[in-house]
Amino acid sequence: MSGLQLWYVVELDSIIMGCGCIARRPWNQSWEVCHGVVHPAARRTGAISKLIELSFDSHRPQPMELGFYVTRNIASHALMLKLRPGVLVGHDGGPDTVDGIREYHLTALLPAKLAGLRHIAPWYARAPGAEVISQHLYQALGFEARPGTYPQTCLSGPASLAKHGQLLYCHDPVNSTLTLSGQAGGYLPQPRALAEIISLLRQSPDLQYVCVQILADKLELLAGLIGLGFTITAYLPAWHLEGGARYDCIQLVLQNFASRPRSHGFDDQVSFFDLAYAQLAKRLCGLRLAQAHA
């Protein structure tokens, strides 16, 4: 056990048969169920289920903390649905590779069990055309669409050391991926944020994948990214923490993979999110256009 990770291990005759972890993510006060691995000889014995149950029983989240997990196959998600049902909110676009083949990872948020999580919805959350937010995500998570003023922050994510202008990012040269991970230096207007992203893309022409999470009210930046070829792959309710409240984020991805990533049983879910978020992007760009002409 460390300050940020709590590990659970099953050992038999000095052989580790399975392990699991709950890891706290301080940057947005969240906690992740992760690193679940079981020895081939212990599969279908219930070992990993017991580990996850034990971790949930002993974990005491703070009122403002948000739980989540990232899954790479339908089997692990089905297991989690039996133990602590999560709500799938989208996929990552497939940046990671296993045996040289890219694969989708899907994110699931865990419904908040404690009072005290102050969630602020964007103003359009219940508007026509945004039903995937209010009806598919909020309803399943137990969130109410209470709109409020969002902070000026444009980008969200854990701080990285690499910097371009005010943009923070993480570059993985092995997989040819780049993930924007927040901003530095105070106020960053949406047009400048877009200009710095364009500059960073021009500086790195060989990238196969770029990911960015923006606060959900930043429709000018969203429209600009869509114009560059980005697509929405996930909508993340209550993902960004600032000033004692949690705000929604939209995850966008730009990729030029030679072939479609593997989905490991998530074909229907990936197709659903791709269609739903393409429709949402069209609706939000329309709202932005109306704002610009108001």
Image (cartoon, helix red, strand yellow):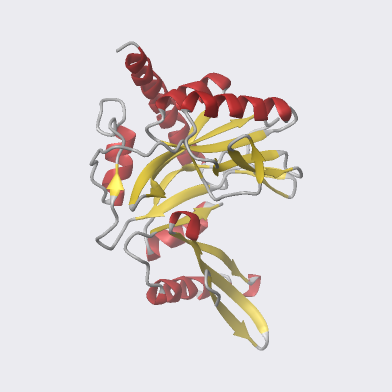
Q: In the displayed structure, would residue 58 be above or below residue 26?
A: below
Would residue 291 be seen by someone viewing this image from the given angle?
Answer: yes
Q: In the displayed structure, would residue 29 be above or below residue 184?
A: below
- Can you give x and y, in whole percent of width and height, for residue 278 in the image? 44, 26
Q: Is residue 226 left or right of residue 60?
A: right
- Can you give x and y, in whole percent of width and height, for residue 49 in the image? 47, 71
Q: Which image quadrant: the N terminus?
A: bottom right
Q: In the displayed structure, would residue 290 be above or below residue 209?
A: above
Residue occupying image coordinates x 40% and y 25%:
279
Q: State the residue in front, 32 or 51.
A: 32
Would residue 94 be seen by someone viewing this image from the given angle?
Answer: no
Q: State the residue in front, 158 or 165.
A: 165
Residue occupying image coordinates x 29% and y 30%:
124
Q: Residue furthest top?
A: 293
Q: In the displayed structure, would residue 85 be above or below residue 266?
A: below
Q: State the residue in front, 239 or 75.
A: 239
Residue occupying image coordinates x 46% and y 22%:
223
Q: State the residue in front, 62 or 75.
A: 62
Location of residue 287 by image quarter: top left
- Can you give x and y, in whole percent of width and height, for residue 100 in the image? 75, 45
Q: How many marks?
A: 0
Q: Which image quadrant: the C terminus?
A: top left
